[in-house]
Image (cartoon, rainbow, N blue to C red):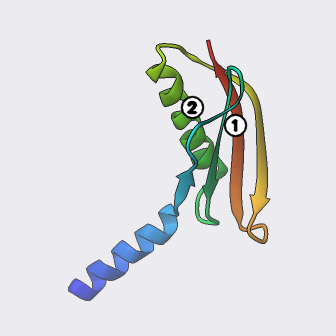
Amino acid sequence: MLKTSLSVSLLSFLLIGCASSSNVYEMSPGIFTVTATGDGYTTADRVMDLAMGKANEACASRGRRLDVVNQNQSRTRMGIDTTIALSFRCV
């Protein structure tokens, strides 16, 4: 039973995949950027949600709302991972 439970947990982890994001950085006055990367098991939508979430948090902490300036999606690490770079301002 324990072996089956462990196998199911491991399989669930592999299907969910992993995603991480950078800190939010101010690239020029009023323009911020954040990147998020997901492994080959993570959808691009999940990676975008992570980047947008970090951007929304940054603007909310300033009492403002998010305005996306630019977004770029690329394949990284031998075309396996998805990286999204998001530039935004808080208005």
| First reached walking from the N terminus: tag 1 or tag 2 | 2
**Crowd class of label 1 (few under 14; some 14 to 19; many from 20; radius 10 Å):** many
x and y percentages locating residue 25 in the rendered image: 62, 37
**Which residue position holds label 1?**
86
Q: Which residue shows up at 52% across the image and 13% down it?
A: 64
The alpha-carbon separation of the residues under discs 1 and 2 comes to 8 Å
> Residue lying furthest front in this view?
29
**Which residue position holds label 2?**
55
Residue type, label 1: Leu
x and y percentages locating residue 51 in the rendered image: 59, 40
Left or right relative to 7: residue 87: right
Residue type, label 2: Ala
Q: Is residue 57 above or below residue 65?
A: below
Q: Is residue 61 above or below residue 49?
A: above
Q: How many marks?
A: 2
Q: Which residue shows up at 54% across the image and 54% down it?
A: 20
x and y percentages locating residue 55 in the rendered image: 57, 31
Q: Is residue 60 above or below residue 46?
A: above
Q: Secondary structure at mark 1?
A: strand
Quarter of the image where the C terminus is located: top right
Left or right relative to 25: residue 3: left
Residue 45 badge: none
Residue closer to the observer: 3 or 81: 81
Q: Quadrant of residue 1?
A: bottom left
> Residue lying furthest left in this view?
1
Asked whether the residues under the numbered discs 1 and 2 touch, taking CB atoms below 8 Å apart as contact, a structural biologist would say yes
Q: Quadrant of residue 42?
A: bottom right
Q: Is residue 19 above or below residue 28?
A: below
